Amino acid sequence: MITGIGHSAIRARDLELTTAFYRDVLGLKEAFRMMKDDGSGVGTIYLYIAPSQFLEIFADGTEEFTPGPKTIGHAHICYQVDNAAAFQEEIRAKGAPIDIERKLGKSRCIQCWTHDPDGNRIEIMELPADSLQAQANKRIAAEETAERRAKA
């Protein structure tokens, strides 16, 4: 059973400029950053929307939008589940393609990938307590509670 939208992801031509728009103009909070696999700089920035809801911004977009891993714009949608292993088998049993088998992601989430009939990429994600997303949820909730108390 899908329990929520984990994150929406976009690929940016200019990572910092795009992050500044969502953070400074739209008011999202930065949750965490992840380095590129080659260590050459920041490759991904997660912005916090609400508990377990994030906007993921990837660096280095170079192509106008067509569904794929390097396009500027919408990259994929992620649906959060309680049990990624069971959900993967459930959608496989229903005939959905599994593009990437269940694995541990860089942020320590458990993920697998499929796509819809139009080729739109879909990530299925489970958030263990040690995942960066779960840790950000806890930290930002505490910050917001402290902010509310300070205003009271």
Image (tube, rainbow, N blue to C red):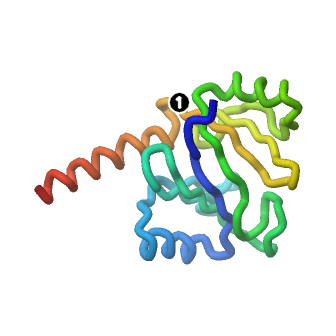
Quarter of the image for residue 15 reads bottom right
Tell me: residue 90, above or below residue 116.
Answer: above
Tell me: residue 132, above or below residue 119.
Answer: above
Horizontal arrangement in the rendering, residue 94 relative to residue 102 (left or right): right
Residue at the spot 74% in from the left edge and 31% down from the top edge: 102
Residue at the spot 79% in from the left edge and 30% down from the top edge: 91
- Expressed as whole percent of the image width and height from the top left, the position of residue 64 reads 80, 75
Q: Toward the viewer: 128 or 37?
A: 128
- Dot 1: few (<14), some (14–19), or many (≥20) neighbours within 10 Å? some
Horizontal arrangement in the rendering, residue 116 relative to residue 26 (left or right): right
Q: Amino acid at mark 1?
A: Pro
Q: Toward the viewer: 68 or 1?
A: 1
Q: For mark 1, what is the residue?
A: 128
- Expressed as whole percent of the image width and height from the top left, the position of residue 101 reads 80, 32
Residue at the spot 63% in from the left edge and 60% down from the top edge: 43
- Total of numbered circles in the picture? 1
Q: Residue furthest left?
A: 152
Horizontal arrangement in the rendering, residue 20 relative to residue 145 (left or right): right
Q: Toward the viewer: 58 or 8?
A: 8
- Expressed as whole percent of the image width and height from the top left, the position of residue 18 reads 57, 73
- Expressed as whole percent of the image width and height from the top left, the position of residue 88 reads 75, 29
Tell me: residue 64, above or below residue 66.
Answer: below
Q: Secondary structure at mark 1?
A: loop
Residue at the spot 33% in from the left edge and 46% down from the top edge: 141
Quarter of the image for residue 38 reads bottom right
Image quadrant occupied by the N terminus: top right
Image quadrant occupied by the C terminus: bottom left
